[in-house]
């Protein structure tokens, strides 16, 4: 029961809202194999476990933005209630609220995905910082190289089209001793 859900599926259901990586209650309920109503009811019964840093309710504008990003949330567009968003800590707290075996296993996978995302972000920040340092250090020496790379990656210029039109006439050659008819044809 180690990999119930592929990591890519979990990764696609993590959104960045209000400066936090969060998961929507509908997605969490699907992953846990529960009804969204049941999940939210369990959270309401244990409200003291979920502070605002663990869970918050989306605004209508945030809901609309999430619905446009994720096709499988289209049913939320006209829902009477606005969904809840759970941070990494809120997802961890859900394991104490939902006590079935599948919820615990899925919860472990979700937390591992959050940890991998955090590690990837830190790695990318470090890489970007190093590239900026190298660019500053070798800017003068490699300016020519950077300019050449920019030119290589620039899209080719499209040839300019001429304005107007050209008339292509049939070329008539005149031979000595013959006169053309009024329509331009020669008769023997």
Image (cartoon, grey):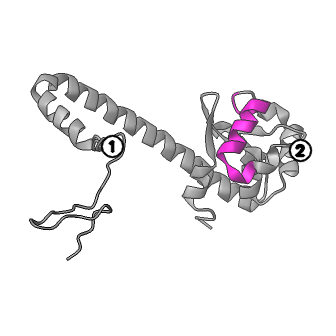
The answer to whether residue 179 is magenta is no
What is the span of residues highlighted in magenta in the rendered image?
Answer: 53-73
Q: Please give left or right for residue 114 compared with residue 66 in the image.
A: left
Q: Going 77% across and 53% down the picture, which residue do you hit?
A: 29
The residue indicated by pointer 1 is 161
Q: Please give left or right for residue 125 compared with residue 65 in the image.
A: left
User: Looking at the figure, which quarter contains the C terminus?
Assistant: bottom left
Q: Dot 1, crowdedness within 10 Å: few (<14), some or many (≥20)? A: few
The image's mark for residue 61 is none
SS for tag 2?
A: helix
Foreground residue among 164 and 95? 164
User: Up-down: is 133 above or below 114?
Assistant: above
In which image quadrant can residue 76 be found? top right
Q: Going 43% across and 42% down the picture, which residue do you hit?
A: 120
Q: Residue furthest bottom?
A: 188
Q: Going 87% across and 43% down the picture, which residue do you hit?
A: 79
The answer to whether residue 68 is magenta is yes
SS for tag 1?
A: loop
User: Up-down: is 132 above or below 72?
Assistant: above
Percent x, y for residue 55? 74, 34
User: Looking at the figure, which quarter contains the N terminus?
Assistant: bottom right
Percent x, y for residue 13? 64, 49
The residue indicated by pointer 2 is 41
Q: Please give left or right for residue 156 compared with residue 118 in the image.
A: left
In which image quadrant can residue 162 be found? top left
Q: Dot 2, crowdedness within 10 Å: few (<14), some or many (≥20)? A: few
Q: Going 62% across and 41% down the picture, which residue do you hit?
A: 15
């Amino acid at each position: 029961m180690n990999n119930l859900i592929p990591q890519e599926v979990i990764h696609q259901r993590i959104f960045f809202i209000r400066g936090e990586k969060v998961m929507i209650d509908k997605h969490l309920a699907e992953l846990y194999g529960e009804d969204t109503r049941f999940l939210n009811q369990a959270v309401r019964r244990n409200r003291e476990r979920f502070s605002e840093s663990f869970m918050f309710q989306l605004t209508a504008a945030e809901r609309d933005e999430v619905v446009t990003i994720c096709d499988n949330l289209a049913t939320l567009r006209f829902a009477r209630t606005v969904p809840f968003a759970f941070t990494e800590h809120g997802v961890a707290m859900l394991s104490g609220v939902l006590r079935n075996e599948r919820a615990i296993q899925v919860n472990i996978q979700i937390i591992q995905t959050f940890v991998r995302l955090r590690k990837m972000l830190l790695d990318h920040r470090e890489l970007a910082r190093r590239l900026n340092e190298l660019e500053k250090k070798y800017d003068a020496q490699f300016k020519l190289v950077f300019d050449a790379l920019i030119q290589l990656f620039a899209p080719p210029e499209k040839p300019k089209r001429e304005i107007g039109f050209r008339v292509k006439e049939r070329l008539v050659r005149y031979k000595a001793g013959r006169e053309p008819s009024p329509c331009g044809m020669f008769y023997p």
